[in-house]
Image (cartoon, rainbow, N blue to C red):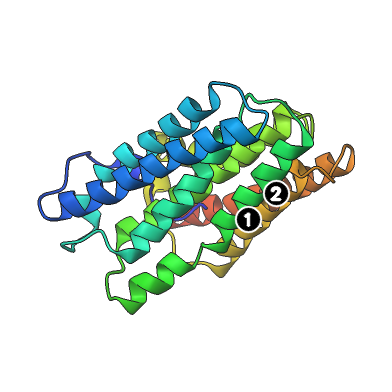
Amino acid sequence: MDGPTPLITTTWRLPDAPLRASAVATKLVALLAVAALAAAARIALPVSALYAPKASVAFATLMVLSLGFLQQHHPFARFGPANQVTTVRAIFVALIVGLVGELPVPVLAASAVAGSIAATALDGLDGWLARRHAIASDFGARFDMEVDALLIMALSVLAWTWGKAGVWVLASGLLRYLFVVSGWIWPWMERPLLPSRRRQAVCVIQIVALIVVVSPIAVPPLSAIIAAIALAILAGSFAIDSWWLYGRQQVA
């Protein structure tokens, strides 16, 4: 989670053709899928009339933001299967974001769990495809990271609004963005971090813990305890990276 500088810190611009056409086509098809799935959920689940707009806006916002950083960080002529898989992950995450503000009923909690598991299960496939097709890029890694960050933020909000943990659980989602803002204040915080298995493991632990927390079977105080342990692990990971960056600044 606390890896490369996210896409939002780079100058936004539309990619050139044919990359633009490849990316836009993928994103438009995916947006239609979000709208269709959200409309189906409106029929099958006890969600409000705002559910579909919330999910669609969340997805469209993420896609527009990511589109503007494709040209600088993806030196290939096509969007590629790896980024298409990440886009599918973003579909599931957008549907979970749409649940924010909905009633805390078991069937919606189960839906959030199912969507989160689907998004998490696909994580790793995109990286494998990028390596297999020799189109791995900085954009793909960052795109994948931001989808994970949005999933954690959405699950944190659901955990709070559905009464599974206190407002402090929002820190699980906000820490990533606070880390980014810190780089705007202290330039040494924007230095690149070395690849880390610990960082990847902590991200998985955080997502899995929050999935358990929002699930129908987890109730307070157990849900709050699980969220607190996961948050402590995440905060420790950010502290390790922040201290390392500070040490590098001191050496420089």
Rendered residue at 24%/56% (across/down)? 73
Nearest the viewer among 182 and 17 is: 17
Mark sitting on residue 211: 2
Cα gap from disc 1 to disc 2, whole angstroms: 8 Å
Mark sitting on residue 117: 1
Q: Amino acid at mark 2?
A: Ile
Name of the residue lying farthest toward the bottom: 132
Rendered residue at 63%/55% (across/down)? 117
Name of the residue lying farthest toward the top: 49
Closer to viewer: mark 1 or mark 2: 1
**Residue 124 percent coordinates (x, y):** 49, 67
Q: Is residue 83 left or right of residue 76?
A: right
Nearest the viewer among 231 and 92 is: 92
Q: Amino acid at mark 1?
A: Ile
Bin the neighbour count of mark 1 within 10 Å (Cα to Cα): few under 14, some 14-19, many 20 and up.
some
Which element is circle 1 on? helix
Mark sitting on residue 64: none
